[in-house]
Image (cartoon, coloured by chain):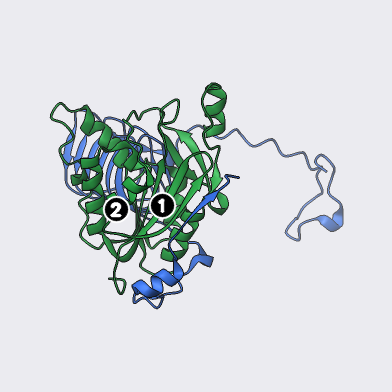
Chain colours: A blue, B green
Amino acid sequence: MLGKPKKPEEESPFTVGKKEEVKPAPPPPPPRPTPTPSEEKTIIGERISIEGQIKGGEHLVIEGEMKGNVEMEKHNFTVGSSGRVDGEIRAQNVSISGQLKGSINALGKVEVTKEADFFGEIKAKSISVEDGAYFKGSIELDREPHRKSNFAAAPKAPASPTAGKAAFSPSSDTKKES
Amino acid sequence: MTTSTAQRRSYSDAEPFPVGYNSTILEQFVNWIEPWKDAQILDAGPVCQENILFFARRMSRHYACDMFIRLQRALGKQAGTGSFCRHLDYPPRSFDGIQLWDMVDHLDDEQAGQLVARCFEMLRSTGLLMLIALEKEPEPAMINTFVIGRNYRVDFRLQQHLQLPWYCRHNRALISLLAEFDFVKSFRYRSGLREFLFQKPGLIRD
């Protein structure tokens, strides 16, 4: 327990000199509010328009216009509500509230808010999309392990009209909703 | 989450509308398509997080094109809708399945015909088309998303940003509209909600 002198057998083998009463260690100083590199971010303002490739070591927020590719695998990329981006994005997490046309490859999550206007391809670990977003795109997520396909590209399943009808016999039913 | 249950609470005078149900047609739709390694599905319904996750976790690649919001924007233009199907600019034979939800209920005959023709082009042979249709316009005539849950449970979520007209059709009119397809199966629920599954004819999958 803190404040109790150490017993001799608990002494460090490197302890030399006379025994001294071990005082409780002072509490560590509170962490300074200085931002770590991962918290730093750059904001491209509404009245800024840039064209070209961006490689980043900190988070990036686009509120202006940008045309070009972005590569920042360890950091987050955000298109703010007034931002307009056209390009390929590779980032840790991506959040879209403005317009984005292009492809996103996120190692983490892609977030599409209801203000967003997205057109393109998304490849990510996970995705969240709010109702009301103007969205047209393809989404590729990690498939569920137990949902590995049984068939290769070439179909092995019955696909002839006859076989299809064997699988789907035309019928109409009335069902009670549960 | 605003489900139909919540909606019914808000509109206590409304006539019964399904509070959610287990969709047999959706299960067949998914079970038919899912086994293919390169399966691709197009969801033309309102953007919905749950549905995107549901399909994207099961298919090689999931496509979402919210045709409801596109129709609304097209209707808002004075020039008219034109062919709002121009947004469905995918190459022919791209998909194994197209999920239209209740899109057809919001299209007049001309628009519905354009949409169905476009779906026929975009589907691979033996590909499936699933749609939902109500027998009559619900009261209140609000637009809902069909939200897929566990075990093919489908619930409803109000889409307040959408205001679209209704063109509810009888079975015969719907099947006639989709005459190019093979009719596979339909279910009618007591609430008047109907689910349909159609298949693009063909000997083998493209």
Disc 2 marks a residue whose amino acid type is: Leu
Please name whichever residue, B193 or B75, is drawn nearer the observer in this view of the structure: B193
Task: Please tell me which residue is depicted at 20% across the width and 59% down the height of the picture.
Answer: B91
Question: In the image, B193: left or right of A178?
Answer: left
* Location of mark 1 (residue): B196
Question: In the image, B136: left or right of A45?
Answer: right
Q: Position of residue B16 (x, y in %)?
A: 54, 31
Which element is circle 2 on? loop
Question: In the image, B203: left or right of B85?
Answer: right
Q: Is residue A58 above or below residue A80?
A: below
The circle drawn on residue B188 is none
Question: Residue A41's image quarter?
Answer: top left
User: Is residue B175 shown to the viewer in this render?
Assistant: yes
Disc 1 marks a residue whose amino acid type is: Phe
Task: Please tell me which residue is depicted at 53% across the width and 66% down the height of the picture.
Answer: A146
Question: In the image, A50: left or right of A17?
Answer: left
Badge 1: chain ID: B
Q: Residues within 10 Å of mark 2 (few under 14, many from 20)?
A: many
Where, quadrant-wise, is the C terminus of chain A in this rendering? Answer: top right
Task: Please tell me which residue is depicted at 80% across the width and 50% down the height of the picture.
Answer: A18
Pointer 2 with pointer 1, Cβ within 8 A: yes
Most extreme residue toward the left is B79
Q: Position of residue B47 (x, y in %)?
A: 38, 41
The circle drawn on residue B178 is 2
Q: Position of residue B143 (x, y in %)?
A: 40, 32
Badge 2: chain ID: B
The mark nearer the N terminus, 2 or 1, is 2
Q: Is residue B59 above or below residue A54?
A: below
